[in-house]
Image (spheres, rainbow, N blue to C red):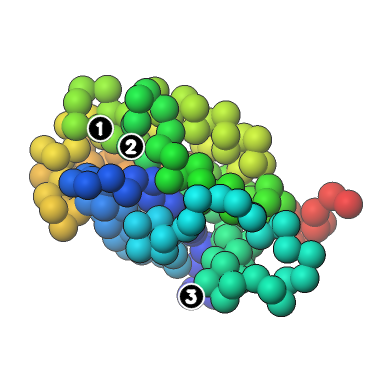
Amino acid sequence: MAANKLKVVLFLGSVREGRLGLRVANFMKKKLEETNHNVTLFDPKEMKFPLLEKPVFFYQDKSQLPEWMKIAEQQVKDADAFVVVSAEYNHSIPPALSNMMDYFGASCYGYKPSGIVCYSAGIFGGMRAAMHLRCMLGELGCLSVSNIFGIPQVQKALDEAGKPLDPHMDSGALKLITQLDWHAHAMRNHRNSVGLPK
């Protein structure tokens, strides 16, 4: 059973002081692990991605890649699916999120699904950022599933450790994960049987 687990990279987008996104990331990581996934969290505050000057694919000689970048690239390549946890900055995607994801070429993301989890302290739940993310993820080749898990007033929905304070959190997460799983298994099976286009 363990060998059949889907590998998921969970991207957390916010680095600003007092961020609420870590609550959401911890909650989603736990829900994914409870539903038989191997999860790797990419947190730009911990990994400290520099402002992008040289993405992975700019290195002609891969031996010149910093070790942390080699490991991160391999984790993205090995993933079966992606979950993107995003705040909303000025009605759009946080710069730390796009900066982090842009380190890796579209070939790392292609032919794999993604799920969007957005949040805000207000009533809109980060949905305006989610609409921008749909476009970005589509261009990377990891189309997002139709369900978007939006969390308004996130400070009332999760405690500081990511424990749900609202019973709708579990059902909302599972609805997204169910869609993501269907697509991730189907795409993985197809990649394994026919490979990727040349």
What residue is shown with label 2? 87
Q: Earlier in the sequence, mark 2 or mark 1?
A: 2
Which of the 4 image quadrants contains residue 156? top left
Mark 1 Cα shell of 10 Å, populated few (<14), some (14-19), many (≥20): many
> From the viewer's perspective, is residue 8 above or below residue 119?
below
Judged from the image, the secondary structure of the residue bearing numbered disc 1 is loop
51 relative to 21 in the view: left or right:
right
Judged from the image, the secondary structure of the residue bearing numbered disc 2 is loop
What is the three-letter code of the residue carrying label 1? Ser
Q: Position of residue 42 (x, y in %)?
A: 43, 59
Which of the 4 image quadrants contains residue 54? bottom right
Q: Residue at x 68, y 47 (%)?
A: 106
Q: Are marks 1 and 3 in contact (CB under 8 Å)?
A: no
99 relative to 117 in the view: left or right:
right
What residue is shown with label 3? 2
What is the three-letter code of the residue carrying label 2? Ala
What residue is shown with label 1? 120
Q: Residue at x 57, y 29 (%)?
A: 135
Mark 2 Cα shell of 10 Å, populated few (<14), some (14-19), many (≥20): many
109 relative to 25 in the view: left or right:
right
Toward the right, the furthest residue is 198
Q: CA separation, marks 2 and 3?
A: 32 Å
> From the viewer's perspective, is residue 82 above or below residue 123?
below
Q: Are marks 2 and 1 in contact (CB under 8 Å)?
A: yes
Which mark, by number, is residue 9?
Answer: none
Q: CA separation, marks 1 and 3?
A: 35 Å
What is the three-letter code of the residue carrying label 3? Ala
Q: Earlier in the sequence, mark 1 or mark 3?
A: 3
Please say whether residue 34 is visible from this viewpoint: yes
